[in-house]
Image (cartoon, rainbow, N blue to C red):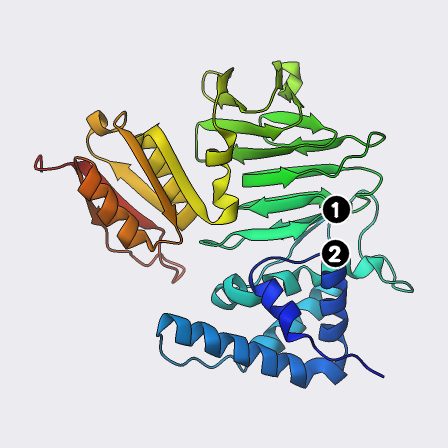
Amino acid sequence: MAEKVDSKLIRRYANGRYSFNDLKRMARWFENHRYHDELKSALDQHWSEFQQARDEKEKDLSQVFDRLRTKILRERNQRKATEKLWTIYTRAAAILVLPLLIYSAFSLFRPGTRPLFSQDQWIEVVSPKGTRTHFDLPDGTKVSLNSSANLMYHADFNRNRLVRIEGEAWFDVFHDAGSPFVVQTDDMDIRVLGTKFSVVSIKEEKIAEVILEEGKVKLTGKGNSFSAELNPNEAFVYNKESRQGEIRGVDAGTLTAWKDGKLIFRSEPLESVLKRIGRWYNVRFEIRDKEIEEFRYRATFQNEPLEEVLRLISLTAPVEYRINERNMDENGLYEDKVITIGLKGTH
């Protein structure tokens, strides 16, 4: 007897909480035409609930299924060194269907399927703008990606536990004494056996960070330019311009709480606060007055809209803000949201 599409599993996908077996199961449904009607119904139901929860106007998702199916089958037949598993239908992806787009990356694990990737190729997972993406790597390592982050891992991952990261990511690494886990960034390699830590490596930012919650990690700069070891509640802060780094004591739990839907600030410079808020909401801050950069700020935000966060900051700090109008570029896409912030009453 054929199994039925599990709506609870779809909800777990919607929240970014799923296992490797969940991915394979969803991929099987999506590939088999017998499940198409059930999947379409589930997509429509979930979108309707999402719309009601946010009091938005009705939208038609009738084309989502066909777009996804077309993209998946097309990518399945392509052989590339790197697969970008995301969709231009970002609104729907951010809510429900991102994990489905990872389907082609996992199809090589199905018995009787010709491998999609050779052993020297990579698989990429992308977290859409303004979202957090949670998933498990093939060895059971848990990963959370912040907004606009992407992670690449080796197609032969069980033999070569190597990942590359751009953006902000948190790892809970599955312990395997015989197979070290290595995270590569543009500036350093991070080598661990089993531990919890986060990495911030964003091309546009001059600072890269590694924050350790549990265990121990060893850091090696590109070209052996530096080496360091971290203990729990320590961070390695690397300046890309000076090519210098230092170890600082931190409260790792507050700095990695974004993976749990929280932004926690404890007497943190406002410049750092705004950077973390910018990553979370996928916005860019322009600071008019340098005096506010070192203003110490303390607050906790959980699932607050951006406008409410800005309002609360302006009430508890001597700053004012302006959300700038977004312009459309030459390709018809809207530019990133920019927020100007400065001292109250100075402009």
Foreground residue among 206 and 4 = 4
Tag 2's secondary structure? helix
Q: Residue shown at 24%/46% (left/top)? A: 312
In the current view of this chain or complex, which residue is farthest to the right? 112
Where residue 316 appears, as percent x and y from the top left, is 21, 39
Where residue 14 appears, as percent x and y from the top left, is 56, 64
For badge 1, the amino acid type reads Gly
CB atoms of marks 2 and 1 within 8 Å: yes
Q: Residue shown at 53%/75% (left/top)? A: 46
Q: Residue shown at 82%/82% (left/top)? A: 2
Q: Residue shown at 7%/37% (left/top)? A: 345
Badge 1: how crowded within 10 Å, few (<14), some, or many (20+)? Answer: some
Mark pair 2, 1: CA separation: 8 Å
Quadrant hosting residue 294? top left
When the figure is inspected, residue 52 is found, relative to residue 333, above or below; the finding is below
Foreground residue among 305 and 105 = 305
Foreground residue among 36 and 53 = 53
When the figure is inspected, residue 111 is found, relative to residue 200, above or below; the finding is below
Direction from residue 121 to residue 131 in the image, left or right:
left
Badge 2: how crowded within 10 Å, few (<14), some, or many (20+)? Answer: some
Query: Does residue 77 appear in this view?
Result: no
For residue 140, the mark is 1
Q: Quadrant of the N terminus?
A: bottom right
Direction from residue 22 to residue 292 in the image, left or right:
left
Query: Does residue 193 appear in this view?
Result: yes
For badge 2, the amino acid type reads Phe
Tag 1's secondary structure? loop
Quickly name the residue at label 2. Answer: 20
Where residue 159 appears, as percent x and y from the top left, is 85, 39
